[in-house]
Amino acid sequence: DTAVSQTPKYLVTQMGNDKSIKCEQNLGHDTMYWYKQDSKKFLKIMFSYNNKELIINETVPNRFSPKSPDKAHLNLHINSLELGDSAVYFCASSQGTHGYTFGSGTRLTVV
Amino acid sequence: DQQVKQNSPSLSVQEGRISILNCDYTNSMFDYFLWYKKYPAEGPTFLISISSIKDKNEDGRFTVFLNKSAKHLSLHIVPSQPGDSAVYFCAASVEGAQKLVFGQGTRLTINP
């Protein structure tokens, strides 16, 4: 039973499209995150939600809109996809500020 | 402005020997440090951590050393095993900040 699951695992789409990535955690954690691993392999935080409330928004373009319907879910919607959005996106959850559990990642390729 | 850096993109070690992975940071406010291990097509998994009030933490074959004055930490794996081949990420956090800042990872290959 996967602790943090995100779907889809792979996503190939054309520039200008809108797409969503879903994330669910069954650990009972209060905080969920989206991280982006760029071409230089750095994992950078995009958003952090605590009990459905946005805590961190790290200067991410407003084409990216996270949505947390409940504390077990944090979805990421991306409008008007650009080539530079191609990356691996990781969802994670934690109880407190340490001890993150990550999902297996979604590899987004924009063509 | 990378606050956490892993300057070795790759490291190759013979099975049974010691692997030493290094990490440097610039933000003196960091008070908690973690190492994550990542296999291909999987998410990072937590390996070991250390608080800034300590200079060493050991868990089985894994030991993390922290040198606050040098803003440097290292992960020692001994003895190294083939299953240790993975990408290792160093991460740091400030208490209450609710985010981890990651380095770019070091790919460790253990040769039989």
Image (cartoon, coloured by chain):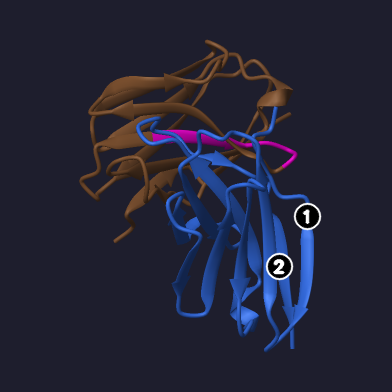
Chain colours: A brown, B blue
What residue would you read off at disc 2? B108
User: Looking at the picture, does residue A76 appear above or below residue A32?
Assistant: above
| Main SS category, magenta section | strand
B17 vs A65, nearest the viewer: B17
Residue at x-position 65% and y-position 82%: B82
Q: Nearer the viewer, residue B48 or B72?
A: B72
In the image, residue A76 lies in the stretch drawn in magenta: no
Any part of residue B43 in sight: no
Indicate left or right for A23 with B112 as reference. Answer: left
Residue B9 visible in the snapshot: yes
Callout 1 amino acid: Pro
Say whether disc 1 or disc 2 marks the residue closer to the N-terminus: 1
Q: Nearer the viewer, residue A51 or B16?
A: B16
> Which class describes the residues within 10 Å of circle 2: few (<14), some (14-19), or many (20+)?
many
Picture coordinates of residue B100 (x, y %)? 49, 39
Residue placed under numbered mark 1 in the picture: B9
Residue B72 position in % (x across, y down): 65, 51
Q: Which quadrant, please, contains the C terminus of chain A? A: top right
The chain under label 1 reads B
Crowding around mark 1 (Cα neighbors within 10 Å: few <14, some 14 to 19, many 20+) is few
Residue B110 percent across, percent down from the top left: 72, 78
Give the image location of residue A22, x and y in percent. 40, 35
* Label 1 element class: loop
A104 or A55: which is nearer to us? A55
Question: In the image, is residue B99 above or below residue A98?
Answer: above
In the image, the segment drawn in magenta is: A33-40
When the figure is inspected, residue A57 is found, relative to residue B28, above or below; the finding is above
In the picture, residue B106 is in which quadrant? bottom right
